[in-house]
Image: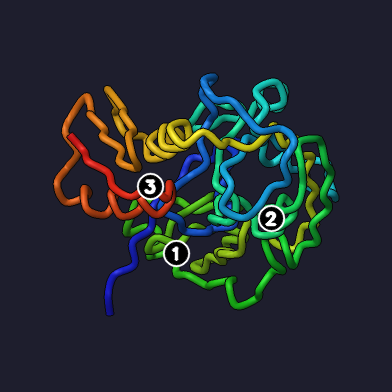
Amino acid sequence: MAEKKIIEHTHEHTHDHTSEHVHTPIEAIAQAPIYTFDTTSTIKKSDFISIDYTGTLQSTKMIFDTTRADVAAKNNMQSERPHGSLILKVGEGQLLKALDEFIIGKTTGSYHLDIPAEHAFGKKNAKLLRLISLNEFKKHKIQPYPMLEVDLDGQRGIVRTVNGGRVIVDFNHPFASQDISYDITINGILTDKKQIVSAVLNIFQLPVKELTLEEGKAVVTFTSPIPAEYTDMLKTEFIRLTEIKEVEFK
C-alpha cells in the first residue's frame, strides 16, 4: 500500500478566485490601469470583462472573497496578487458557475446575487469525512488538533476531531452547505484586440517586453526565455482565448 503524504498548512485569511476547485489553465488577474471598455453592450459568453465583487456567507455575514482593496484591508484579507478590479473571460470557469452564468446578459452596473449552497460550494458529504490513524501524522512529524488544515495526498482537509489514536479529517469545502451572496460591479467589456491580447499575457503572468499585433498575428518578445516544454501549450491556449490567427514567441 502506498504511503500517505500529509502536509500541514499554516492558516491564513485569504481569498481564492477559484475556490470552487475548478481547474482551469488561466486565472482572473488584477486589472492594470491601461484598458478601455465598452460600457453599453450586453455581456456575452467569451467576452473579456472588468469586474469587482465581494462574496459573503449569508449565515455569518463573513466576507470570504473580494477584489476590493479597501474591503480586503478592513477584513485583514491576504492574496497572492494585489486586490483590484479583475479582467476575466466569461464562461472560462474563472468564477463560481452560478456567478459566471449570472453575468451573461448583464450590462455595466452593480448587482446583488444570492446563491444557495447547492449552487455555491455544495452540500456537505459524509463520505468526505475520513478516519486517519494518528500514526500517519506522527510519521510526518505533525501533531494534529481541531481546525488544523492539512494536505493529504494533494487533497485539502481540516482536522475536526482527535480522539486517542484516531483523527477525523473533513475534506468537504470549508464553505460547504453555506448559502452565499455576491455584490458585483461590472465595469465594462474589453473590446480592443490588442488590449485583449495584453490581458491574456497578463493572465499567464508572462514576462513581456514587447507586443505587436498586425493582420491577426501577435508577436510577443519576452524579457526572459519561456521553457520550451510550455511553449506549444501556451501558444495553443493563447490562440484559443484571444481568437487570433497566429502567435510568435521570441
Residue 14, position in %: x, y? 58, 37
Residue 30 vs 105, above or below: the answer is above
**Left or right placement of residue 197 versus residue 211 in this view:** right
Query: Could you tell me the amino acid type at mark 1?
Result: Leu
Residue 96 vs 203, above or below: the answer is below
Which residue is labeled 3 in the image? 244
Q: Is residue 158 at least partly visible in the picture?
A: no
Residue 5 vs 77, above or below: the answer is below
Q: Residues within 10 Å of mark 1 (few under 14, many from 20)?
A: some
Earlier in the chain: of badge 3 and badge 2, it is 2
Q: Residues within 10 Å of mark 3 (few under 14, many from 20)?
A: some
**Cα distance in 3D space between marks 3 and 1:** 54 Å
- In the rendered view, how is the structure colored? rainbow
Residue 186, position in %: x, y? 72, 36
Q: Is residue 75 at least partly visible in the picture?
A: yes
**Left or right placement of residue 236 versus residue 102 in this view:** left
Which residue is labeled 2 in the image? 175
Earlier in the chain: of badge 2 and badge 1, it is 1
Q: Secondary structure at mark 1?
A: helix
Which image quadrant: the N terminus? bottom left
In the image, which is nearer the foreground, mark 3 or mark 2? 3
In the image, which is nearer the foreground, mark 3 or mark 1? 3
Which quadrant would residue 185 be assigned to in this image?
top right
Which residue is labeled 1 in the image? 134
Query: Could you tell me the amino acid type at mark 2?
Result: Phe
Residue 151, position in %: x, y? 43, 56
